[in-house]
Structure formats: structure tokens, C-alpha cells
Amino acid sequence: MLFLSLIIILVLSGYGYLDTVSRRNILIRKMKAEVRSTSQTLKVSLETIQLPEEIGYIQGLIDAVSESKETFGVIVYYQRENLIFRSHSLEEGIEPYLDSIKRSIREHRPREEFGAYKKVPIFSYTLPFRDRTGKHIGGVCIFQRTSLMEKEIEKTKRSIFFTILVLIGGTVALILLGTRRWVTQPISKLTEGTKSLAKGNLDYKIDLKSGDELSKLAQAFNQMALDLKKAQERILQDAETKVELERNLRQSEKLATIGQLTSGLAHEIGTPLNVIYGRTELIKRRLGDKEIQKNLDTILYETERITKIIQQLLGFVRKKKPEQKPLNLCVILETSLDLLDHQIEKQRVKVLKDLKDNLPHVLGDPDQLQQVFLNLILNAIQSMPEGGTLRLSASPKRVSKEGLEDDQRHYMEISVEDTGVGMQEDVIQNIFNPFFTTKDTGTGLGLMVTQGIVQDHEGWIDVESEVRKGSVFRVYLPCLEER
């Protein structure tokens, strides 16, 4: 549009320039014709005058001609008598014009030229005249003001400029209206459709029925959106199939790990059983001793430890499909904090919560997710033996699951952050492995079970940590409307 407007402006400007030049030439020819006519009339009168009897009549002729507002002045020169007659407006500085008259007499032809007399722009016309015998005896020079012609030219320029300005404005306005209707508005609809498509709205349709190229482009866009929707449905079906396959694969891997777990169980269960056995023998030999109560407490502690290990192992191996019901994670997090209130107070931990109302729900098993957050919060508390700050937050976030970078969905991000001792990189890489622990009394199964529960809910866990600064565990669970 800009290019077309520039072309129109250049064409109209060129037309205006040529029209101005044409009108200027017409005005100049008109002025010259008037001067020639006046000169011819004055010439005829001068050729019939008798010298010296009619000298006064010559001056009267000159004054009569000079009365016209266009005429600036007149010079009459008689060569034989060397007489010079001039208008009262011509006081001095007429020598160049006398020379022009003499040259015109010698050449027997008129002369004309543009110039200035005392900074007044003029047009001079010089014409020789004869006596009754046909001999050139003198000449006359008439000065015509060109300022009047220039004023007329300026007036013409303004008129042409105004006309061209109106034409340019009207043409550009028509172009803008036409462009807006047939180009800008269709392109805006295409742009809006592209943005809507980029946001995931594959049901958006562009309605253009003009029958031009943009309409064909809109039809192609609508077909592309339809194809993308079908492709998305196929991808979601494939993703669900993949998730189910991953779940089955994890279960198979768990069963395959049983053999690897056996050697660890022999140590983890065998040691507490040996302690129980030894304490029991001691009780038999020293029944009634004052240390009986202490030994019994030890037996109870070790027995509870064996029970805990077996329960976690069974939860890891046994395949239990999570219950599916809408859950408010903020309620589960608040409940988890209440259950661990004693440990929080005992460890002198300050809790900061960022749990907003009206957050999206997730679909899952409340007991299993309760176990996830209890494990993570308890680990955070235990990593701050001298107290610290525990931050809990929950917010929706649009992210891509690892391995599906092109499929962004809405997830709930639950962050458990502590200011504890932190972990080194090699520890972070092994914390979800079975029986890996950094605690003296840990079993190494808590985080492994936690990760399995989150994966069964189609989510994942990210971990960041820095030694002596703390750790942050981020749990991602799909929002209910995205499942």
C-alpha cells in the first residue's frame, strides 16, 4: 500500500509540475504578445512624427504608454538626431538598454530579454522603426513588469497544489479503505486464528468468503487446524498407551528387582533378628535382672524396624492401582503438616506456606498422595537438625513431561523446600534407588516408593540441592481438566 501511495503521489506531483510549467509558458507568451502589440502601435505612431516640431508629442506618447500598470517604462531613441526620450520611472542606468536599441537598429530585427532594472524584474522588448523612406532612424524599448506574471504563476501553483493535495488525499483514503476491507481485516483474522491455534484452540475457524487468495489461505488454515486436531487426538491416544506400557514396564522391573533386593534384605532383616535373638538369650539367663526393661525396649524397637522394612518392601513390589477421585492438594498438604506437627516443633522448624485458594484439582488416590507428601516433608524436617525454614507451595504451571517436549499440559507443581544440609550431585542421582540412604537408621525405600506413587499418577519429581544451603523437591501432577 505504501509503495502504491508513493507512485500515486509521484504521478500527481509530476502532473502538477508539468501543468505549472505549461501555464507559466502560456502566461509568458501572453505577456510577450501584449508587449509586442504595444510596441507595434507605438512604432507606427513614431514613424509618422516630424522632428523637431513634434518632440512634445513623443513624450506624451511615452507617458500614455507608461500609465499601464503592467508597463514599467519606455525608451525612444532617434539615432540621427541622437535624441533620447524616456519615462519618468527611468532616471539613470539605461545605457545597457540604449545599446540594445542600437544593436536592434543595426541588425534590423527586434530583441527581447528578461532582466532587472534596479532590482525590479522586467521583460524588455526592443524594436527599430523607419522614416517615410524606409530607412531605420531609431528604436523603441518597452519594459514590462514580470512581477504581475509571477503573482499569477504563484496563484496558479497554489491552485494546482491544493487540487493535487485533494486528489492525493482522496486516492490514499480510497486505498486505505480498500486495503482495510480486502487486505487488513482478512490478515487480522488470519493472525488471530494463528494466535488461537498457537494457544491450543484447534476448533478455531476463519470465515472468509471473498473468493480471493486470502480466502483460499483461510480455507487452507482451517484444513490445517482440522488435521492438527486429528493428529493431537492420535498423539493423546498414543501417549495414554505409552503411559500404560510404562506402568506395566515399571511393574516388570520391580519384579525383576526382587532378586537384587534379596541380598539387601538378608542384611537389613538379619541384623535386627540377631539382636533380638541375643537379647532374648540374655533375658533367659538373667531373668529378674534390673536391665530386663531396657532389653525389652530394645526388642520392641528392632521388631518395629523389621515391620517397617517389610511393609515398605511389600508396597514397592505389590501392584496396586491408585484410586481415582478429584483431590484438593492444599487440603492434603495441610493434613500432612498437622500429622508432622510434633516433629516440626521438636526440630524448631519454621513453616512458610504459599497455598492459594481455588487451585485446580488433580485426580488420584488420597492415601497414596498423603504418603508422598509425608515422606517429602519428613525428609525435609530431618535434613534440618538445628532448625531452619520449610517452604510449601502449590501452583498450576504449563510444562512438558520429560520425553514429550512438544506436548505441553497444565500440571500442579507442589514444591517442598528446606534450608537443610543439602546433597551432593552423586547423592541426588541415587536417592530414588532401592536401599540407598544417607541416614544411620534409614531403609532407603521411602523415596523409591514416593517416586513410584507419583509416576503411577502420571507425574514426576524434580530435585535441586546445594550442600549447606538446602534442597527443593518439586512434584508435578496433571490437573484434572488436562487428563
Image (spheres, rainbow, N blue to C red):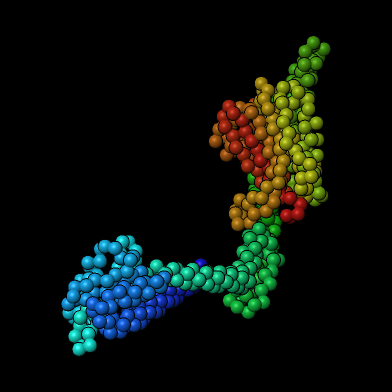
| Left or right relative to 64: residue 437 | right
Residue 70 picture quarter: bottom left
In this rendered view, identify the residue nearer to me: 148 or 451. Answer: 148
Looking at the picture, tell me which residue is in the foreground, 374 or 53: 53
- Residue 326 or residue 157, whichever sits in front: 157
- Looking at this view, name the residue that lies furthest to the bottom: 133
The residue that appears at 74% across and 55% down in the rendered structure is 483
Q: Position of residue 2 (x, y in %)?
A: 51, 67
Image x and y of residue 316, in percent: 71, 43
Q: Position of residue 396 (x, y in %)?
A: 71, 46
* Left or right of 345, for residue 214: left
Residue 263 appears in which quarter of the rendering?
Answer: top right
Residue 372 occupies quadrant: top right
Q: Residue at the spot x=66%, y=50% of the render?
A: 398
Q: Is residue 405 above or below residue 101?
A: above
Describe residue 423's horizontal placement relative to residue 102 as left or right: right
Q: Report the residue at 67% width, 25% height from top.
A: 388
Task: In the rendered view, tell whether residue 320 sits above or below residue 59.
Answer: above
Vertical placement of 350 versus 286: above or below?
Answer: below
Mark yes or no: residue 100 visible: no
Query: Would you say 281 lies left or right of 30 here?
Result: right
- Observer-nearest residue: 354 or 150? 150
Residue 313: image x %, image y %? 72, 39
> Farthest residue in the front direction?
53
